[in-house]
Amino acid sequence: MIDKIRQLTEQTQAFTAKSAAEIEEFRIRMLGKKGELNALMEQFKQVPPEQKKTLGGPINALKNAIQEKLATLKAGLESAEQGPQSDDLSRPGSNDRLGARHPISLVKNQIEAIFKRLGYTVAEGPEIEDDWHVFSALNFPPEHPARDMQDTFFIEKNPDILLRTHTSSIQVRVMESQKPPIRVICPGRVFRNEAISARAHCIFHQVEGLYIDENVSFADLKQSILYFAKEMFGEKADIRLRPSYFPFTEPSAEVDVSCNLCGGKGCNVCKGTGWLEIMGCGMVDPNVLEACGIDSKKYTGFAFGMGIERITMLKYGVRDLRLYFENDLRFLGQFDSAIGG
Ligand code: PHE
């Protein structure tokens, strides 16, 4: 009888099953009414009492071993049904979808990289500003229309707290806290109270630049912008400056870059002119330097400012501003994150 118990224990240990049916078959053979274990129990009843002592333990151990085996086989079968876990460790894994950088971030990084090569550093500032840093220090007359409720999102009135309408406010903070020579670019989000359409949005992004030192001239400004245009739009890019007006620069200009889509011949993007407007610029008004504690007799400087959405539109042909904010993966997935790091 002890041989039979040993034999059944070995069979139990060696048993494997590929299906629930096989497990059930094994259970019936071992634990069923007419199964091996019951047969053993019948024999056990017949043996003399002194032998019962030596046989009781092994029979119990066999019963436990069978029950344990059934439990582990069942558990293994269930987890195999649930997932792709199999013994095949060479199966290829499932890929996670990689994200892409937002086109605005890509172009912002490119603009920063170009000006860093010219020795500029990056400065940032708060989006919620006061009247001084957005308007007053920048020589805006008190009645200037840009202060109007129509353009500016005011948070509090008297004293005015508002969302910055341009990142020139960062330049004021830099001028107040640093001594010339100053060479910074100021990227950031800006806010204007405009109705949202394909061509206008109440949130957009700017990069503004500021260079202040002794003997900085308009020629330096022009050359820096020409360098930027060629780096951004290619060696063939050309620029032209048109006289303009900003309260904080004198003289002021608007910069056009030659249309990179038609090579200057005229197309529907440049409306047949061959030129595309990309930024405003000018020599920093002495009033601004003085308001920020910089000696305007000793120092001169230039400033420029551009919209990142506009540059992105020209580089990638994105015609609708709203696409930048909708987070549609079909749009965002098209941009190569390798460009501009
Ligand atoms: N701050 C101006 C704007 O938001 C851009 C600008 C910056 C123009 C610097 C001239 C010089 O429109």
Image: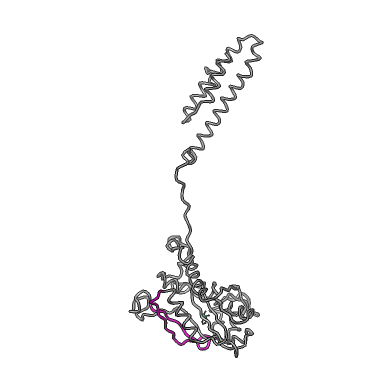
Position of residue 118 measured from the top left corner of the image (x, y, whole percent): 51, 76
Q: Quadrant of residue 313?
A: bottom left
Residue 149 visible (yes or no): yes
Question: What residue sits 43% from the left and 60% below the top?
Answer: 330
Q: Is residue 340 above or below residue 52?
A: below
Question: Closer to the camera, 55 or 300?
Answer: 300
- In the rendered structure, does residue 251 fall within the stretch colored magenta? yes
Out of 112 and 61, give the one closest to the viewer: 112
Front-lying residue, 298 or 329: 298
* Residue 309 point in image, percent of width and height: 47, 72
Image quarter in which the N terminus is found: top right
Q: Is residue 257 left or right of residue 190?
A: left
Q: Residue furthest bottom?
A: 297
80 versus 309 height, above or below: above
Left or right: 7 in relation to 328: right
248 in the magenta segment:
yes
**Percent x, y of residue 222:** 47, 83
Residue at image point 57% right, 28% down: 68
Task: List x then y, in percent, for residue 55.
Answer: 62, 15
* Position of residue 179 in the picture relative to residue 335 (left or right): right
The type of colouring in the image is one colour
Which SS does the magenta portion mostly show? Answer: strand
Q: Above or below — where is 223 with respect to 24?
A: below
Direction left: furthest residue: 265
Q: How many marks?
A: 0
Q: Residue at x 50, y 24 (%)?
A: 26
Whether residue 204 is visible here, answered yes or no, is no
Residue closer to the observer: 196 or 60: 60
Start and end of the magenta stretch? 234-258
